[in-house]
Amino acid sequence: MQQFINHNGNFLPADQPVVKATNRSFRYGDALFETIRIANFKPQFLKEHLQRLTNGMRVLKMQPNQLFSELFFEQAILELAQKNGVESDGRVRLTVYRNDGGYYAPSDNSVSYLLEVSSLAEKGYTLNQKGYTVDLYTEIKKSLGPLASIKSANSMLYVMAGIFKNANNLDDCILVNDKVSITEAISSNIFAVKNGVLYTSPIEDGCVNGVMRKKIIEIAESNRIAVYELSVMQSVLLGADELFLTNAINGIRWVVAYKQKRYFNTTSKKLTDKLNELIK
C-alpha cells in the first residue's frame, strides 16, 4: 500500500524527497520532534506532546505558528493515518524545523512541519515478554542545561549510544550526565523500584521531559505508589528490585539485567494495566 507523509498540509509519497540541501534540520539539527502513539485510532496524550513541543520551540526561539493547535494536529494525524491504512494503532512522528535562511545564525525563525504515520501491530500498550538487558554508556556524557530536556533533532549522543548498544548486544543503554548520575536510556526515561517505591531522575539532571514519564508518575501517585524524583547513581540501579523504561510508543519496557543484577517486573505489569485503562 502506498504510504504518504504530510508536509505543511500537502500529502506526498513517503518515498519522495522533501527537503533541500539548505534545510536547517539537515544542516544543523535545527528541529524538534514528537513521537506519538495512536491507540484505538486516537492520538494518545496529544495535549501533553504539543505542550512539550511548544515549550521546546520557545527555548529554541522558533516563531509560533498560529495553526498549531491540538485540534489541527489531531485532524492532520488521523487523516494521514486513514490514508496510510492505520486501522487501530500507529506510530506518529511530528517534526517541526526552522525554515531555510542563514548559516548558524538563522535569518528566519518561522517553521515548517512534517507528519509521518505508520501502523503498529500490537493494540494498546503491551509489556515485553523478554526483559531488556542494559548497561551504562559513558563514552559521551550528556551536558546539563536548557537544551537537555527537549526533543531535538540534534541527536548524536543517542546515535553513538545506539552504536555502543549494537556492538555489545544490548537491548538499550543508560546515559549519564556530566556529574555521572543517571539521566535516561536511548529513547526512554528510566525508573527504579525499591520496596514498592519509584525513583526517577529529575528533569534538572538532563533527562528528556518525557510525556510517558509524566503519565507513569501520575498513575503511580493516583494508585498510592510513592515517586521520588532524585539524582540516581549507579548504586541505586544495583540496589533496585525492578528497573523499567518508558516512552510514548511502547509505554513500559521492563529490564531483566543490568551488569550482574537481575530484576522482577511486578510493578511494570501493574502500571501497564493502569496505562491501558487511560486509552480513550
Image (tube, helix red, strand yellow):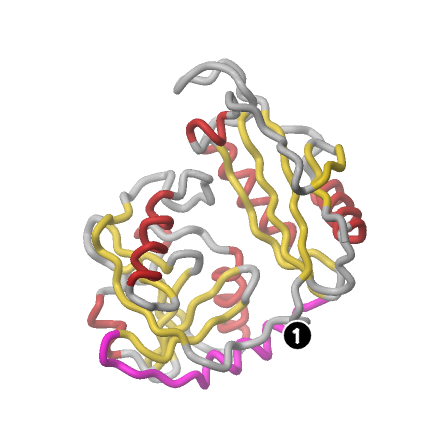
* Image: 126 above or below 176: below
Residue 90 place in picture, x, y as percent = 67, 59
Q: Is residue 206 left or right of residue 276?
A: left
Q: Is residue 64 visible?
A: no
Residue at the spot x=53%, y=45% of the render?
52
Residue 227 to residue 138: above or below: below
Q: Nearer the viewer, residue 43 or 2?
A: 2
66 or 110, which is in the foreground? Answer: 110
Residue 124 figure quarter: bottom right
- Residue 7 counted in the magenta span: no
Residue 149 in view, yes or no: yes
Percent position (x, y) of residue 64? 60, 28
Q: Is residue 265 covered in magenta?
A: yes
**Residue 68 higher or lower than 101, as above or below:** below
Residue range corresponding to the magenta coloring:
259-280
To which residue does mark 1 refer? 277
Seen in the picture, residue 76 relative to 61 is either above or below; the reply is below
Q: Position of residue 91 (x, y in %)?
A: 63, 56
Residue visible at 28% across and 47% down in the picture:
142
Left or right of 96 on screen, residue 172? left
Residue at x 62%, y 29% (from the top left corner): 112
- Would residue 150 be found to the left or right of residue 134 on screen? right
